[in-house]
């Protein structure tokens, strides 16, 4: 009986430490030292949340820099036309993210996306870029592994500078400076490649006008 009581007591002590004290310490540290990151790295505009710096969102207007295509498109359908039984709406209903995991040899990869002007899948992106006079880059044609990447490469951003400057009647140097200001460097200075946060860049564009 004595050993049983000791075991129960030890279990309760470990439970209090690991399930209450430890999470509370992390919560306090996160809210005080890393408030923005702990709450989703949300971006606000005039007091309204417009997105997160960690989650990519689509832009189709010629006035904005385009982000990379995604297999996940949250809540893009009209509420009155929403049908949760359709496979196309499943990822939006559940919030599932991720790539299609289709190999280059898989014919379904070429059929990805909606038909447009007689083209399908990857060809849609190539056709869209061609019409806009944008040099295709890999990240403007193919989705990322998570399908939620908020960044595009410097090459992809620079390929759109001329279009943005023309549509918004801006000086090229103005747009180039915005791209530079919204470019995130390599992690710890050595890992990965520099990337341009599309949402931050487009908000900065709106701020100019």
Image (tube, rainbow, N blue to C red):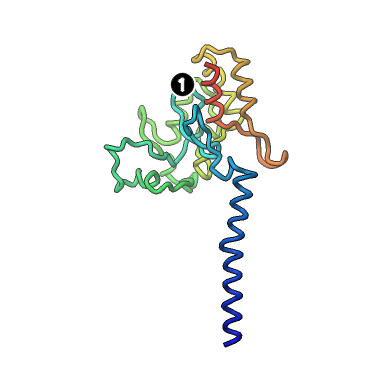
- At which x and y percent is residue 206? 51, 21
Q: In this view, does 181 lie above or below 37?
A: above
Residue under circle 1?
Answer: 62
Residue at 49% over, 15% down? 167
Local SS, label 1: loop
Height in image: 69 above or below 158? Answer: below
In the picture, residue 127 is in which quadrant?
Answer: top left
Q: Position of residue 2 (x, y in %)?
A: 60, 86
Farthest right residue? Answer: 189
How packed mark 1 is, by other alpha carbons closer than 10 Å (few <14, some 14-19, many 20 or more), is: some
| Above or below 9: residue 202 | above
Q: Position of residue 53 (x, y in %)?
A: 55, 36
Q: Which residue is drawn at 38% across and 39% down?
A: 75
- Seen from this angle, which residue lies furthest left? 80
Which quarter of the figure has residue 155? top right
- The x, y position of residue 89, in whole percent, is 35, 44
């Amino acid at each position: 009986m004595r050993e049983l009581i000791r075991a129960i007591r030890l279990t309760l002590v470990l439970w209090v430490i690991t399930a209450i004290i430890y999470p509370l310490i992390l919560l306090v540290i996160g809210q005080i030292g890393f408030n923005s990151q702990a709450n989703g790295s949300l971006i606000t505009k005039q007091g309204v949340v417009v997105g997160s710096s960690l989650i990519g969102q689509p832009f189709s207007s010629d006035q904005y820099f385009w982000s990379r295509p995604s297999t996940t498109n949250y809540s893009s359908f009209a509420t009155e036309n929403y049908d949760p039984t359709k496979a196309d709406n499943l990822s939006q209903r559940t919030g599932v993210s991720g790539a299609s995991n289709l190999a280059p040899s898989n014919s379904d990869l070429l059929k990805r996306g909606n038909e447009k002007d007689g083209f399908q899948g990857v060809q849609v992106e190539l056709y869209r870029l061609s019409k806009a006079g944008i040099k295709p880059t890999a990240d403007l044609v193919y989705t990322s592994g998570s399908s939620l990447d908020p960044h595009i490469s410097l090459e992809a951003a620079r390929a759109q500078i001329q279009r943005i400057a023309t549509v918004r009647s801006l000086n090229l140097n103005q747009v180039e400076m915005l791209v530079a200001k919204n470019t995130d460097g390599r992690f710890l200075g050595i890992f990965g490649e520099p990337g341009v946060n599309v949402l931050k860049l487009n908000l900065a564009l709106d701020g100019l006008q």
